Image: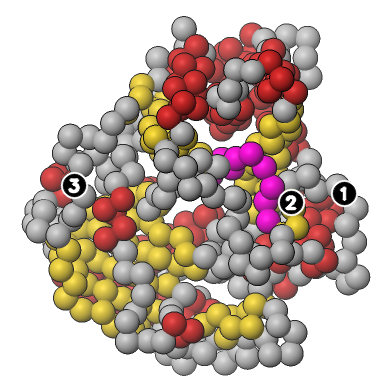
């Protein structure tokens, strides 16, 4: 059975006792071709918010933290040549008002800090400790608010000789896949090797058509009137937080459950993937955890998740594309159908969201963003960090012990994280009001009885 971490680990440290030694700016190692600005696609421009990730490393005799920090600083300076936009600044085009990046080589931030603790003292790295936010340098105090870098890296040493690399980037710069390529390139250059992948920085590849043409109903999107709304609605409710840990065996059992109930249906074995079965399980538990009233079964539940559109476009977008090339897929059903349908049907509904994402559908969604200002619209979003591979990046001092985003509790976002020990396992991070969490937990366990 999948296990649950009901409470924070006993060793959870709330204050990592961080001392910041230095904050500086890193500039491109050589002059880059001066571009007036970088166009941002309609996908990019609605993602104007920070993304924080932390990458933990064990101690390495040849690369103590201060040596690793200097190597990273040098490598980042080199990387700001092919990634010249990262050293720029966000601005509104004075003529069109559209958000863009001024490629002015103003630099990225770099901080060096230390903790009074050893890495083992931090405890279970899988459990999203709010204190991990202390491993992130959120701003460069010497700069004005409108001159803040699009990327800041902080290297924090621990007493044991291990260290953490905390990175904050504005989401307009990368999606998860392109950030993974950035990390691969950072590791390569740190090891004095050529770039692992040459980045493709042409954001015009995802420009809207002229004139824009919306050819599909986009139930996954909704218009907004606020100038800077959240991606989906947040809540001020008090939330319980739990980590549901599914082993590779648990996931294999879910796949068998889907196959067994798929006899005579249209769902193929090829669609019964780890992501699809875990997402279907989570959808079932989340949709039915609202309440037990009979009338609630008529409520329509909408699940959202991100789909990489690079291989889906015609012609395909380069896999090295640096911008945001993910769109929101959706699955919709009444709670009655979710409650009564065989598991294979839920898996099928999940897979239909990605299947729907053809070239024309993706272009229609991008064009929708040219006509309207909007954001993803659903009951909740599955944000998967499961297979991005941040912990597979090979630095000179080895792979990370663990890599994760800094988590903020949201009832409308459920996160999938990789497991440290089980390569095919997944950790499902759920935040819900107490009553809903109790129902979610009961429904979750029923799938493994």
Residue 307 percent location from the top left of the image: 65, 46
> Which of the marked residues, 3 or 2, is nearer the chain's N terminus?
3
Question: Residue at position x 69%, y 69% from top?
Answer: 41
> For the residues carrying marks 2 and 1, which lies nearer the camera in this image?
2
Q: For numbered disc 3, what is the local secondary structure? A: loop
In this picture, residue 393 sits left or right of residue 323: left
The answer to whether residue 385 is magenta is: yes
Q: Earlier in the sequence, mark 2 or mark 1?
A: 1
10 Å neighbourhood of mark 1: few (<14), some, or many (≥20)?
few
Question: Pointer 3: what residue?
Answer: 13
Q: Is residue 197 visible?
A: no
Circles 1 and 3, Cβ within 8 Å, touching? The answer is no
Q: Residue at x 17, y 34 (%)?
A: 10
Classify residue 68 by image quadrant. Answer: bottom left
Asked whether residue 229 is drawn in magenta, I would say no
Asked whether residue 226 is in view, the answer is: yes
Counting the numbered discs, the total is: 3
SS of the residue at dot 1?
loop
**CA distance separating discs 1 and 3:** 49 Å
Q: Secondary structure at mark 2?
A: strand
Task: Tell me, for residue 221, which label it has, or none.
Answer: 2
Displayed quadrant of residue 270 = top right
Q: CA distance from mark 3 to mark 2?
A: 39 Å
Q: Position of residue 62 (x, y in %)?
A: 14, 61
The residue tagged 1 is: 216
Magenta-drawn segment: 375-388
With respect to residue 166, does 334 lie above or below? above
Counting residues from the N terminus, which is met first, the one under dot 1 or under dot 3?
3
């Amino acid at each position: 059975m999948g296990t649950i971490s009901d409470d924070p680990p006993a060793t959870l440290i709330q204050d990592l006792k961080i001392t910041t030694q230095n904050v500086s700016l890193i500039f491109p190692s050589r002059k880059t071709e001066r571009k007036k600005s970088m166009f941002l696609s309609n996908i990019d421009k609605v993602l104007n918010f920070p993304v924080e990730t932390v990458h933990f490393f064990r101690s390495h005799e040849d690369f103590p933290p201060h040596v690793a920090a200097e190597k990273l600083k040098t490598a980042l300076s080199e990387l700001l040549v092919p990634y010249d936009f990262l050293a720029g600044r966000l601005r509104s085009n004075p003529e069109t008002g559209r958000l863009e990046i001024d490629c002015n080589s103003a630099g990225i931030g770099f901080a060096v800090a230390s903790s009074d603790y050893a890495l083992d003292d931090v405890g279970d790295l899988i459990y999203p400790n709010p204190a991990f936010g202390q491993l992130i340098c959120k701003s460069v105090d010497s700069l004005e608010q409108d001159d803040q870098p699009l990327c800041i890296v902080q290297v924090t040493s621990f007493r044991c000789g291990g260290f953490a690399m905390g990175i904050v980037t504005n989401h307009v710069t990368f999606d998860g896949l392109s950030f993974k390529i950035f990390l691969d390139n950072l590791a390569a250059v740190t090891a004095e090797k050529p770039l692992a992948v040459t980045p493709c920085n042409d954001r015009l590849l995802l420009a809207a058509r002229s004139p824009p043409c919306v050819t599909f109903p986009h139930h996954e999107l909704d218009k907004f009137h606020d100038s800077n709304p959240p991606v989906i609605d947040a809540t001020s409710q008090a939330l319980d937080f739990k980590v549901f840990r599914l082993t590779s065996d648990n996931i294999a059992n879910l796949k068998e459950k889907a196959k067994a109930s798929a006899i005579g249906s249209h769902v193929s074995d090829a669609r019964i993937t780890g992501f699809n079965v875990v997402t279907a399980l989570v959808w079932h538990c989340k949709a039915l955890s609202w309440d037990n009233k009979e009338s609630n079964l008529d409520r329509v539940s909408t699940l959202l998740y991100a789909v990489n559109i690079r291989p889906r476009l015609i012609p395909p977008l380069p896999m090295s594309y640096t911008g945001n090339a993910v769109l929101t897929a959706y699955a919709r059903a009444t709670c009655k159908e979710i409650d009564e349908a065989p598991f294979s049907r839920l898996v099928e509904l999940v897979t239909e969201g990605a299947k729907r994402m053809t070239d024309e559908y993706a272009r229609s969604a991008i064009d929708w963003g040219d006509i309207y200002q909007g954001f993803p619209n659903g009951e909740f979003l599955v944000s998967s960090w499961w297979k991005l591979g941040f912990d597979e990046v090979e630095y000179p001092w080895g792979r990370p012990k663990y890599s994760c985003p800094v988590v903020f509790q949201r009832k409308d976002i459920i996160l999938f994280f990789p497991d440290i020990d089980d390569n095919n396992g997944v950790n499902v991070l759920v935040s819900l009001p107490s009553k809903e969490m109790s129902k979610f937990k009961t429904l979750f366990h029923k799938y493994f009885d």
